[in-house]
Amino acid sequence: MAKTVEEKFKKLDEIEHCLLRPGRYIGSVSPHTAETYVVDTINDKMVSKEITWCPALIKVFDEVISNSVDHSKTDEGKHVSVIKVELSKETGEISVYDDGGIVVKKHKEHDQWVPEMIFELRAGSNFNDEDDSMLTGQNGEGAALTSIFSKEFHVRTADGKNQFDQTHLENSRKKSEPKVKSSDKNFTKITWTPDYEKFGLKSLDQGNYDKLVKRVYDVAGCNPKLKVYLNGSRITIKSFEDYVKFYTEEFIYEENDSWRIAVAHSDDGFEHVSFVNGTETTIGGNHIDYVGLQVWNKLREYFNKKHKVDIKPSQMKEHMKLFIDCDIIKPRYSSQTKEDLITEPKNFGTSVEISDKFINKIVKSNIIQSVLDWVAAKEYAEQMKSLKSLNKDAEKTNPSRVEKFADALEKRDRQKCVLFLTEGDSAAKAVLAGKGKNPFIGSFPLRGKPLNVREKDLSKIIANEEIKKIMIITGLKIGEKVTSLAQIRFGKIAFTTDADVDGAHISGLLLNFFTHFWPELLDLGVLSVFRTPLVKVFMKDKTLEFFNEREFHTWEETEGKKIKTWKHKFYKGLGTSTSAEFKQYFENMDKHLFHILASGKDDLDAIDLAFNSERADDRKVWLETPAEQLV
């Protein structure tokens, strides 16, 4: 059935429109659940916790307390020094008191008492756009909205001559007759009971109570000249810097007459706590970018000059918390809820220039290391993405097709298998000859010295055939952490090189390769050095093995002089040992296989120090340091 014209078209009065479309005036009346800051009143700090609250309820409270703050900033309210807030979870009643006072006079044009008129929509004292106002209220709605969304709203004020009392009922539709009497006091006290049903609530629950308490602390933090009380107890915050301490103990702070700014480190991405003329801008706005870009651009110059990396402001900010309390003339917001400042910086009417001293303090803070760690992680991730192309090549190739690779014959219990990476073909042949029918030994001869993978040229790593072959043989994959020996084809990998400088360098480069991509192999006990004797002493009934000349000469000068007949042989390289001798080595594997162990980050850093070309200066100091000082 078609609607009549009267049913289709409606004309609402102002109160009806506010109640029907609350989002237009006071924000969302739906419950909002999120991680947010609340006050730990016992320990005097802000804590982040998940709560549920109604943004609109907090907004109508803010309209009243902002009136008190605004009044303290006017010439007629310069005597205001106290704000007292009472919150009752039992009754749901809220009150805000200040020692100011609204002028108790009748407005000649409208024939209304001023304290009655200003709590109606479209009324107030902030309509003169020529004034350089730094007040919150501007649209003539403010506390009138608090009255509209209340079951009862009581106004009591005195201007030093007269006192005014009036009660608004039924969402401001009914008002009692004003009561005016003489008084020598100055104060304003607004007491109201919100119409909780309009906010989807039954009463003042804990989540909304916590948010209201937080807002009172905000007022104290942004207005240190005011004495702010909550439920009879004073909130002692001496400055905005003192307020920032509720969030963190470590921060850098700077201020001028109109701007108070702090920067701290953040582990959870960019975060801001910001206020414009005492009103919290939870969304943010142009004041955030105005200050932030000064900080981030100056730090960008520092990183470019000092660390040779270009970090965009959008990346830099992710490591910081920014605290701002600023005074702006005639601020404009994206909505009546005043959460997002849209005033352009050129129209702020005030300014701040971040000093070099402030930046230098940030440079010395843990923020810088956090950014550098992020850069390193980003570079590493990009490297891994490029290097993972090696995995595809390795997966496509059968290990048996790798030239000169002799696989262990054991198929099932591969964790018992040992891969000997040898220095050259001759050593590999000696390993093959000595293993005999041992099914747990595999070998692969290295061609020259392995690539130093800590160099930045990824194209060399990707194109290196030796690295590809090692990955095919072992089953290791770049970017894939080894959590179990079942992931790889050998339980142990033994570096088998000559006992000379070149051999030590090859073993070092192999260690560098494996620990750079898979440091966990050290904890799993996979990496070893296979050592053969440098000197053998042959006696009638036994043979002695020495792994370095010092040990041999010590024996020679002591025990050797006591024995009449013995001879010795120097083994210049792995190829000097016969197949029979290699067989003996394998039969005494525990004597010749030395596991490489790491005691923590310091050991891994030592490997990086030795092979990272960007640490040449550090390496020079290390090489010139006496050995006894390195222990």
Image (tube, helix red, strand yellow):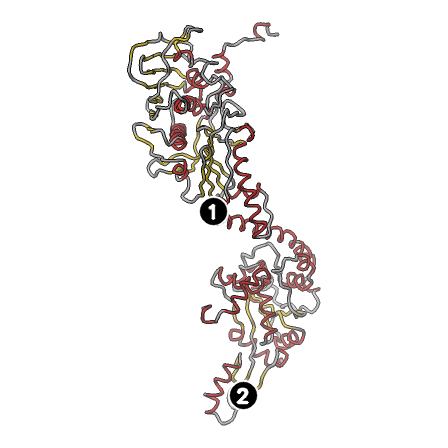
In depth, the one of 335 and 50 nearer the eye is 335
Mark 1 or mark 2: whose residue is earlier in sequence = 1
Q: Which mark is residue 614?
A: none
- Name the residue carrying label 2: 538
Measured as percent of width and height from the top left, residue 594 is found at 52, 71
Name which quarter of the figure residue 512 lies in: bottom right
**339 left or right, relative to 240:** right
**Badge 2 amino acid:** Phe
Give the SS element for disc 2: strand
Out of 113 and 26, give the one closest to the viewer.
113
Residue 361 is labelled as: 1
Residue 258: image location, x then y, percent: 46, 32
Q: Quadrant of the C terminus?
A: bottom left
- For the N terminus, the image quarter is top right
Above/below status of 15 relative to 316: above
The CA span between labels 1 and 2 is: 69 Å
**In the image, 167: left or right of 390?**
left
The residue at the far bottom in this view is: 564
Q: Is residue 477 above or below residue 106?
A: below
Q: How many circles with numbers are drawn on the protein?
A: 2
Name the residue located 58 percent from the left edge and 72 percent from the top edge: 504
Image coords of residue 85 (percent x, y): 34, 25
**Secondary structure under the numbered disc 1 in the rendered image:** helix
Where in the figure is residue 113, as x and y percent of width and height? 39, 9
Look at the image and tell me whether residue 372 can be seen.
Answer: yes
